[in-house]
Image: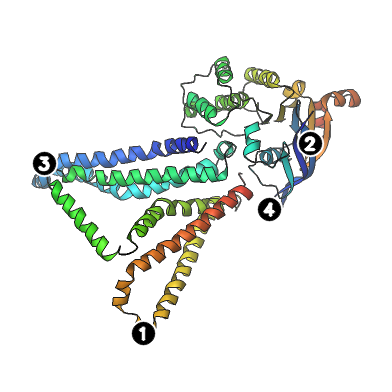
């Protein structure tokens, strides 16, 4: 499997706070990877650095062997933890905008998913509930045929029924040419979809293993191991 | 991609500026209609009519004065929201360069500034049409142009016009984008940072200009007279505009570098 993300001695400071601390990591295509850790463990910071929204304090991050830039943005589909789309547009305008900017955007796929989740394309994005806004954002993100999906808390704000649909959608997008990086606290919900789990604690990587290994060698679920490692 | 960025930037700007221009021209037409119906004397004799005319005139004058100011506020907010707020999570992950973002913002902003100038001029038409003959207006504009050409635009005329247009359309925008972008270097106090950057820009650019001016006058020594000043007026204008263009070019480069190497979307 080819490497899509490579972090070398990656560090990010916010003033005197260390968000990511000398992280060495590679992510390979063809996997669904859970980026797990408590609040403030550096998950979002790491994802932002992959997307070029934050500049590392030291070290480097490479996407397909290149620093984050135009080429990496062509192949990464990013779902931020907050609603980032222009809220004055209607949903169908947002679909058109994604078509305009992303060559890998599959309009039909987006329309099917919108219909499945009963989201009216004529509605203004601003008038939607927070949960529905998150759904629209996720649909637009998943309707791309990207090489890397970075999903920061993709199911945190949606109802359990939609959560199942979203996880199914993520699984359907899984292929040998793509990697899915999911950051979440809802480990029980995503555990069955994950191939690999990464545990981040205070900016350092404390676990990087396949879910099968965790279950077979440690005899625990990812959720149980998480509770053990991050016990307060 | 640049064309697409400009399209969406223009859409974002026009949502706010077009209603503003509509209010400006609409209030001008309303004022003319009021004056046609009631006249100045009628407006003065009846309290109710006076209030109506006053309100319409007030809205027109406020729109007229606020138009230019509001356009720059809208341009600033659009830049901040697109690239520095939550929306930055979307726009900054589009597969385009930072230069494209900046150029798109500058070109769409310039177009809106031109539209504001057109709306400003159009708003006078309802008030003057019928009261002043078109040939008189054209003669007035011609006279003003002759004055400018005679006294300001001698040998450097065309160059001064081109540079003035560039400064008017892009200069202020670059300063705004520079201040907002540099401001985000101060985590959690980005707006304060932008104001500090504006103060820094103003102090530094004015100080350097003052030093150049003082040095220039000193070099003239005892030869400095009003005649010399008049003879070199266009040179002085050209030097001033060129100076500010250099400042804007530096600030564009700094803005670009900060976006590329020091971006910190919180």
Query: Which residue was labeled with disc 1?
Result: B222
Who is closer to the viewer here, A11 or B229? B229
The answer to whether residue B235 is above or below residue B121 is below
The answer to whether residue B80 is above or below residue A81 is below
Protein chain holding label 1: B
The answer to whether residue B245 is above or below residue B109 is below
Instruction: Confirm whether circles 3 and 4 share one chain.
Output: no
Mark pair 3, 4: CA separation: 66 Å
Mark pair 1, 3: CA separation: 62 Å
Measuring from the top left, give residue A220's x and y in whole percent. Answer: 86, 25
Who is closer to the viewer here, A185 or A123? A123
Sequence-wise, the earlier of marks 2 and 4 is 4
Extreme-front residue of the structure: B155
Q: Quadrant of residue B84?
A: top right
Disc 2, disc 1: CB below 8 Å? no
Protein chain holding label 2: A
Query: Which residue was labeled with disc 2?
Result: A26
Sequence-wise, the earlier of marks 1 and 3 is 3
Protein chain holding label 4: A
Query: Which residue was labeled with disc 4?
Result: A15
Query: Which residue was labeled with disc 3?
Result: B38
* Residue A97 located left or right of residue A34: left
Protein chain holding label 3: B
Extreme-bottom residue of the structure: B222
Residue drawn at point x = 44 percent, y = 61 percent: B244
What color scheme is it? rainbow
Disc 1, disc 4: CB below 8 Å? no
Residue drawn at point x = 47 percent, y = 69 percent: B207
């Amino acid at each position: 499997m080819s490497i899509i993300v490579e972090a070398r001695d990656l560090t990010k400071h916010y003033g005197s706070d260390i968000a990511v601390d000398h992280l060495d990591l590679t992510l390979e295509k063809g996997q669904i990877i859970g980026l797990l850790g408590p609040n403030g463990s550096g998950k979002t910071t790491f994802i932002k650095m992959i997307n070029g929204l934050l500049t590392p304090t030291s070290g480097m991050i490479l996407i397909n062997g290149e620093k984050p830039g135009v080429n990496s943005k062509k192949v990464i589909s990013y779902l931020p933890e907050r609603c980032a789309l222009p809220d004055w547009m209607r949903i169908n305008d947002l679909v058109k905008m994604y078509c305009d900017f992303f060559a890998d955007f599959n309009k039909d796929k987006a329309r099917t998913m919108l219909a499945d989740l009963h989201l009216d394309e004529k509605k203004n994005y601003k008038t939607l509930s927070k949960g529905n806004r998150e759904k629209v954002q996720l649909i637009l993100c998943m309707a791309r045929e990207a090489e890397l999906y970075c999903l920061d808390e993709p199911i945190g704000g949606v109802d359990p029924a939609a959560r199942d649909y979203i996880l199914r959608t993520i699984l359907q997008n899984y292929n040998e040419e793509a990697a899915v990086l999911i950051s979440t606290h809802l480990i029980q919900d995503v555990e069955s979809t994950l191939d690999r789990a990464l545990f981040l604690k205070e900016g350092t990587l404390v676990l990087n293993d396949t879910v099968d290994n965790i279950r077979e060698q440690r005899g625990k679920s990812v959720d149980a191991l998480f509770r053990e490692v991050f016990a307060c | 991609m640049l064309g697409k960025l400009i399209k969406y930037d223009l859409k974002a700007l026009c949502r706010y500026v077009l209603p503003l221009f509509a209010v400006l021209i609409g209030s001008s037409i309303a004022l003319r209609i009021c004056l046609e119906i009631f006249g100045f004397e009628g407006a003065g004799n009846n309290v109710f009519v006076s209030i109506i005319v006053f309100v319409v005139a007030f809205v027109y004058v406020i729109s007229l004065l606020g138009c230019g100011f509001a356009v720059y506020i809208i341009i600033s907010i659009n830049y901040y929201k697109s690239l520095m707020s939550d929306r930055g999570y979307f726009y900054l992950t589009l597969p385009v360069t930072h230069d494209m973002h900046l150029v798109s913002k500058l070109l769409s902003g310039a177009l809106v500034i031109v539209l504001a100038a057109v709306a400003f001029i159009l708003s006078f038409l309802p008030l003057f049409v019928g009261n002043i003959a078109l040939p008189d207006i054209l003669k007035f504009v011609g006279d003003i142009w002759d004055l400018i050409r005679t006294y300001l635009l001698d040998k450097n005329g065309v160059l001064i016009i081109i540079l003035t247009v560039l400064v008017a359309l892009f200069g202020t925008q670059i300063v705004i984008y520079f201040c907002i972008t540099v401001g985000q270097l101060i985590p959690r106090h980005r707006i304060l940072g932008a104001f500090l950057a504006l103060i820094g820009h103003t102090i530094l650019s004015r100080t350097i200009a003052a030093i150049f001016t003082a040095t220039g006058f000193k070099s003239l020594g005892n030869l400095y007279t009003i005649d010399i000043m008049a003879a070199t007026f266009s040179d002085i204008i050209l030097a001033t505009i060129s100076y500010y263009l250099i400042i804007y070019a530096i600030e564009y480069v700094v803005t670009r570098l900060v976006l590329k190497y020091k971006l910190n979307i919180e």
